Image (tube, rainbow, N blue to C red):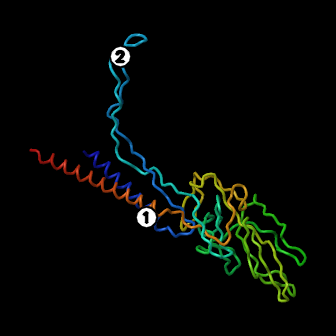
């Protein structure tokens, strides 16, 4: 009887965890770049009442049956949480019209430097702060990538042929707000991001002259097992013990997804599935609670036997 109570309590705990995960998924249905999670249940240690036996025969082939075999007798001791698995499938894209918003179409993560060190995110809502740094708008984390050597241009040349050295570690990207000096000075007027993450800035002078310069490329972080990443604050992740080491590449190369500029990746939460899972968890919780009340009633009957 006590085993029934223990198993039911384990079931209640498991369904409560499932409800916590479902509630978090539903709460983040509109969170940019959010990845939903699911709970995987596993049976706890079982008590073996009998290991079973093999059939007994006598004589050589063809043997004569003497006694049939018996199957094992095992009683489960409840349920536990085997894992909470993140669904890393891509969410739908939403156009924003903002030229600094990017969505990764496929594998990979933006590489960000912030208060928690290096983190990785699918939230590509970007902006340029007062220092000219390219940052994630929601957190202020610095977007990392590669930049050509300074100065970024001369009066007669541009960096249009520059290629990022992706074998080197990326660093925060700072976009110069002006180039040149004196009569040749030009101020930034526009910034564009290409599908490969290349950042091109347009500068204009007081005389109407205009110059375009490639000022950097956004780095995309890749992992052998992205489900092994550890979720931290916001929609960011850090390297986990089972994620494998990060490698960096440009968007659209080496398996990384290209960038959809002017768009953001929305949450991949399927609200209809979450509501269905909620109903299942609620009913399972009710049944586990019923087992407890039934076992209690049976124990009460036993205690009344004189």
| Label 2 secondary element | strand
For this orientation, the residue located farthest to the top is 59
User: Residue 66 is drawn in which quadrant?
Assistant: top left
**Label ID, residue 75:** none
At label 2, counting other C-alpha atoms closer than 10 Å, the crowd grade (few under 14, some 14-19, many 20 or more) is few
Question: Which class describes the residues within 10 Å of circle 1: few (<14), some (14-19), or many (20+)?
Answer: some
Q: Is residue 49 left or right of residue 82?
A: left
* Left or right for 136, reference 293: right
Q: Is residue 200 left or right of residue 18?
A: right
Q: Look at 28% across and 55% down and name the residue there.
A: 289
Q: What x and y, as percent, mark residue 303?
A: 14, 47
- Residue depth check, mark 1 versus mark 2: number of the one nearer the observer: 2
Percent coordinates x, y for residue 274 in the rendering: 44, 61
In the rendered image, which residue does mark 2 sit on? 65
Nearer the observer, 125 or 278: 278
Mark 1, secondary structure of its residue: helix
Split into 4 quadrants, where in the image is the N terminus?
top left
Task: Check residue 23 in the rendering and tell me which mark sits there, or answer none.
Answer: 1
Above or below, comparing residue 236 to residue 180 in the picture:
above
Observer-nearest of 177 and 288: 288
- The residue depicted at 68 percent of the width and 70 percent of the height is 261
Please report the residue visible at 33 percent of the width from the left and 56 percent of the height from the top.
285
**Badge count:** 2
């Amino acid at each position: 009887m006590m085993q029934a109570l223990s198993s039911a309590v384990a079931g209640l705990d498991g369904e409560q965890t499932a409800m916590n995960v479902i509630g978090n998924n539903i709460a983040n249905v509109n969170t940019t770049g959010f990845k939903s999670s699911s709970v995987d249940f596993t049976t706890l240690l079982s008590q073996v009442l009998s290991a079973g036996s093999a059939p007994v025969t006598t004589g050589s082939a063809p043997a004569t049956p003497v006694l049939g075999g018996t199957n094992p007798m095992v009683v489960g001791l409840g349920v536990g949480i085997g894992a909470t698995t993140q669904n890393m499938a891509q969410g739908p894209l939403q156009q924003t019209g903002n030229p600094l918003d990017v969505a990764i179409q496929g594998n990979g993560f933006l590489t960000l430097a912030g208060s928690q060190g290096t983190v990785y995110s699918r939230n590509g809502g970007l902006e340029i702060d007062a220092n000219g740094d390219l940052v994630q708008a929601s957190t202020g984390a610095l977007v990392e990538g590669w930049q050509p050597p300074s100065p970024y241009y001369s009066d007669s040349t541009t960096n249009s042929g520059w290629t990022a050295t992706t074998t080197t570690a990326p660093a925060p990207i700072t976009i110069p707000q002006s180039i040149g000096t004196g009569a040749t000075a030009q101020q930034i007027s526009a910034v564009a991001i290409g599908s490969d993450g290349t950042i091109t800035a347009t500068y204009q002078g007081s005389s109407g002259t205009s110059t375009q310069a490639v000022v950097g490329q956004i780095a995309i972080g890749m992992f052998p097992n992205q489900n092994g990443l550890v979720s931290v604050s916001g929609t960011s992740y850090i390297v986990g013990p089972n994620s494998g080491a990060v490698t960096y590449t440009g968007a659209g190369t080496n398996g990384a997804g290209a960038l959809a500029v002017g768009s953001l990746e929305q949450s991949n939460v399927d609200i209809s599935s979450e509501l269905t899972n909620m109903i299942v968890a609620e009913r399972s919780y009710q049944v586990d609670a019923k087992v407890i009340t039934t076992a209690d009633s049976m124990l009460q009957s036993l205690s009344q036997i004189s």
